[in-house]
Image (cartoon, grey):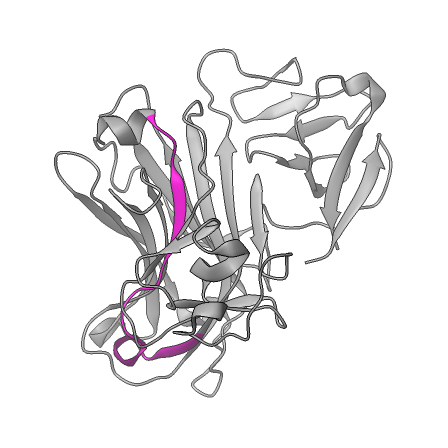
Amino acid sequence: MKKHLLKLFSFGMITSLPVYGDILVEFTEAGYVGTGTTQLWSDCLQAQNGGKTTWVENTWGSYAVDSTFGHVVVDGTRAFRKAIYQTSLTADQTDYSVGIAFTFNRSTGSLSDRADILAVEFTEQAEGGGRLSLTLERMNGGNSGNYRLSFFESTGSSNSFGNAGWMSETVMGFADESDTVSDKLYLEMTLSRGADDSSGNVSGTLTNLTMDPQIPIAEFGTDVVGNFDTSDAFFTGPLYGLIGSGVLESESHVSNRLIDSFSLSTLPGMGGDPVWAGLPVDENGNVDTGDVLGWINVSSGNWVWSYNLEAWLYLEEPTDLSAGVWSYVTK
């Protein structure tokens, strides 16, 4: 992904892009070096940037950086491996989001059981603790050819489960049995902490970035699981985002899982009287910036939707709008 820096007032043409987040990790960035060889220390995520400073894996070598092609290769011979990003999201926010952009190959063999492909998760500890996990799951038997979003939570006094967002594999780019490579997909989970440690809830989406980055192909609503309880540390402390690898590829009949980017966001809560750059935010996250950018939507963190430009802008909240604003955009 190529970043462009422009100074924006109320004019200009900008290419639309999907929401990624306050923290966007692309594996062509400085410090990410490797040939994509799993179970090789120098290539693994945990070894990047000096070792265990940017990522921690529960088994090193399960995720390998290929800096030439700009992605991370997932080791298909290991199941349920985790890679935890070591920059946390601060505890003073209400809503949090974690996401990955990825592709994968699939074969059409029969599955003995439904199978996890990839997951995005939150935990309250830098090297792993309780889990909130949203997984892309491949179905078996009479549901063969279908996928869904599946949620698991192990942070409170009892575990919570749920699934939704059933979809045919055709919406992910698999036109027929001979079409073995998915389109580029974006899996995202959003956590709302709620007013106390017994009122957390989650939502999630899967989006086909190749077809339409604005419209999800599968959704997991906050009503699927409803409110659940979390530990005090999970409710009051910082959160860490992570990637989960799912089951063995021999069980899921997928291969070549390639993660192109990882993102984290803190999202403005809608309680009380929210403001952005000193301006009121309505219940849908909209702000009227006047002659600067007109109406914008700030409900997705620093990725801001401009209604006038019909585009996503990476725009950090300014203290003084009258001087104009700087924004990163993507083409």
Report the front residue among 89 and 277.
89
Q: Work out which residue is located at the far front of the displayed protein and give it.
A: 50
- Figure label count: 0
| Residue 113 in picture, x, y percent from top left | 19, 72
Residue 207 visible in the picture: no
Q: Work out which residue is located at the far right of the displayed protein and give it.
A: 11
In the image, residue 165 sits, relative to residue 123, either above or below, namely below
Residue 248 on the magenta segment: yes
In the image, residue 42 sits, relative to residue 47, either above or below, namely below
In the image, residue 58 sits, relative to residue 276, either above or below, namely below
| Residue 187 in picture, x, y percent from top left | 45, 54
Report the front residue among 170 and 318.
318
Which quadrant of the view contains residue 308? top right
In the image, residue 57 sits, relative to residue 131, either above or below, namely below
Q: Work out which residue is located at the far left of the displayed protein and give it.
A: 158
| Residue 264 in picture, x, y percent from top left | 50, 43
Q: Which quarter of the image is occupied by the N terminus? A: bottom right
Q: What residue is at 51 percent from the left and 59 percent from the top?
A: 48
Which quadrant of the view contains residue 294? top right
Residue 217 on the magenta segment: no
Q: Is residue 97 left or right of residue 327?
A: left
| Residue 224 in picture, x, y percent from top left | 27, 42
Q: What residue is at 41 percent from the left and 45 percent from the top?
A: 241
Report the front residue among 121 and 33.
33
Q: Work out which residue is located at the far bottom of the displayed protein and give it.
A: 178
Q: Which quarter of the image is occupied by the C terminus? A: bottom right
Q: What residue is at 55 percent from the left and 36 percent from the top?
A: 300
Residue 220 visible in the picture: yes
Write the start and end of the magenta stretch as one range.
Answer: 237-256
Q: Is residue 222 left or right of residue 308?
A: left
